[in-house]
């Protein structure tokens, strides 16, 4: 059974930083691309960042490029998202998501964590 | 980035109805399209990938079709558990993008 557990969300002031983590279990973490997808309150879905199975390729939405940094530690089965220069419009639930195919860079999003809420407010 | 447009944004239907949701892409997707269902307060769930392949465990009343830039999700015989919001997502490039969503509510 796949489990994805996000942590690190909370309330942060504009301009500050926050780090999210996602612990994965139940599958071969090092074989799958991983993603962070966010959903602002009452809004749709946005894939903010994705990383290939081996960490060699990373993809960022224009809205976060230069501010967010995605990384993974395959030895610890953990995905990270470092968020800097946070803005109020970064307020959202952030989901950790497992890619469906093996050894790829991004495809359909097969399993989702429960999400962690990030609120950017003064 | 590839832009994804869903229609309608809201759809009112009754149990037993056949429901169709459309998703259009700004460029050809080579069938690299997925559909998701999301219920309030829950994470999305993958329903269909590669435009028409049903994910394991998804009821057969869900089906996907289309090619190129136009795709549809059909629910044949809407069930009470199907009232939710549905999203399409392209993966023709590694810059994954979603449609804006279609909320299916009770008529």
Image (cartoon, helix red, strand yellow):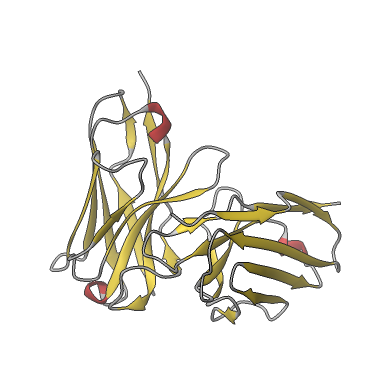
Q: Where is residue A120 in the image (x, y as percent from the top left)?
A: 36, 28
Q: Which residue is drawn at 38% across and 23% down?
A: A121
Extreme left residue here? A75
Q: State the count of labels.
A: 0
Residue B26 figure quarter: bottom right
Residue in the foreground of this view, choosing between B40 and A57: A57
Q: In this view, does A106 lie to the left or right of A81?
A: right
Q: Is residue B78 left or right of residue B88?
A: right
Residue in the foreground of this view, choosing between A94 and A47: A47
Q: Residue at x 26, y 25 (%)?
A: A15
Q: Where is residue B87 in the image (x, y as percent from the top left)?
A: 59, 58
Q: Where is residue B52 in the image (x, y as percent from the top left)?
A: 61, 79
Extreme top residue here? A122
Q: Which residue is drawn at 66% across and 78% down?
A: B59
Q: In this view, does A10 lie above or below A50?
A: above
Viewport quadrant of the N terminus of chain B: bottom left
Q: In this view, does A2 lie to the left or right of B28?
A: left
Residue A33 figure quarter: bottom left
Residue A32 figure quarter: bottom left
Q: Where is residue A107 in the image (x, y as percent from the top left)?
A: 41, 70
Q: Is residue B81 left or right of residue A111?
A: right
Q: Which residue is drawn at 65% across and 75% down?
A: B66
């Amino acid at each position: 059974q796949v489990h994805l557990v996000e942590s690190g969300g909370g309330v942060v002031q504009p301009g500050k930083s926050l780090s999210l983590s996602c612990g994965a279990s139940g599958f071969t973490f090092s074989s799958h691309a991983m993603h962070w997808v966010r959903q602002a309150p009452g809004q749709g879905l946005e894939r903010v960042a994705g990383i290939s199975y081996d960490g060699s390729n990373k993809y960022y939405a224009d809205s976060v490029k230069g501010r967010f940094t995605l990384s993974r530690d395959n030895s610890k089965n953990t995905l990270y998202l470092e968020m800097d220069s946070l803005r109020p419009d970064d307020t959202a639930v952030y989901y950790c998501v497992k890619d469906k195919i093996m050894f790829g860079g991004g495809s359909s999003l097969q399993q989702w964590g429960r999400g962690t809420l990030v609120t950017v407010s003064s | 980035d590839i832009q994804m447009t869903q229609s309608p944004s809201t759809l009112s239907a009754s149990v037993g109805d056949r429901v169709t949701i459309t998703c259009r892409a700004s460029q050809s997707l080579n069938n690299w399209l997925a559909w998701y269902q999301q219920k309030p307060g829950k994470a999305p769930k993958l329903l269909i990938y590669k435009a028409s392949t049903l994910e394991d465990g998804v009821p057969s009343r869900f089906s996907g079709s289309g090619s190129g830039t136009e795709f549809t999700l059909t629910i044949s015989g809407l069930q009470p558990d199907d009232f939710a919001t549905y999203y399409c997502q392209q993966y023709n490039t590694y810059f994954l993008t979603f449609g804006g969503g279609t909320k299916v509510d009770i008529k």
